[in-house]
Image: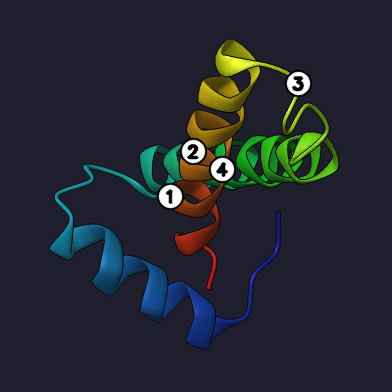
Amino acid sequence: MKLEDGLLSQMDRVSGDFGFASRTEFIRAALRDKVEDYRLKEAILKLDKSKGALKGKNKVDIDCDSAREMAYERIASRFR
């Protein structure tokens, strides 16, 4: 993998600040974080599509909808 010198310098500084022993460890962690971000965004999209779908059906549905709304807002706030 080829990276620009400026990016390598930044990566070395940041990885050192976070205590990574090598560039490889830093890159692995960065890739894991990116995959997790993608999964969270996918979950937000799924929650968004189902948001309000059961609203007003019965007490259990209302409780579930309320919990879904809270979960959606909590997750979505991470990306604002």
Question: Mark 1 belongs to which amino acid?
Answer: Arg
Q: Secondary structure at mark 2?
A: helix
- 4 or 63: which is nearer to us? 63
* 2 and 1 marks in contact (CB < 8 Å): yes
User: Mark 4 highlights which residue?
Assistant: 69
Give the mark nearest the N terminus, 4 or 3.
3
**Residue 56 on image: x %, y %:** 72, 31
Q: In 3D space, how far apart are the residues under numbered discs 3 and 2 (Cα atoms)? A: 20 Å
Q: In 3D space, how far apart are the residues under numbered discs 4 and 1 (Cα atoms)? A: 9 Å
Give the mark nearest the N terminus, 1 or 3.
3
Residue 71, which numbered label? 2
Question: Mark 4 belongs to which amino acid?
Answer: Glu
**Residue 47 on image: x %, y %:** 71, 37
Q: In 3D space, how far apart are the residues under numbered discs 2 and 4 (Cα atoms)? A: 6 Å
Crowd band around label 2 with a 10 angstrom C-alpha radius: few (<14), some (14–19), many (20+)? some
Q: Secondary structure at mark 1?
A: helix
Q: In 3D space, how far apart are the residues under numbered discs 4 and 3 (Cα atoms)? A: 16 Å
Q: Nearer the viewer, mark 3 or mark 2?
A: 3
Q: In 3D space, how far apart are the residues under numbered discs 2 and 1 (Cα atoms)? A: 5 Å
Residue in the picture at 75% in, 21% down: 57
Q: In 3D space, how far apart are the residues under numbered discs 1 and 3 (Cα atoms)? A: 24 Å
Residue in the picture at 32% in, 67% down: 12
Question: Mark 3 belongs to which amino acid?
Answer: Lys
**Residue 63 on image: x %, y %:** 51, 23
**Image side of residue 33 versus residue 56, left or right:** left
Q: Secondary structure at mark 4?
A: helix
Q: Nearer the viewer, mark 4 or mark 3?
A: 3
User: Mark 3 highlights which residue?
Assistant: 57
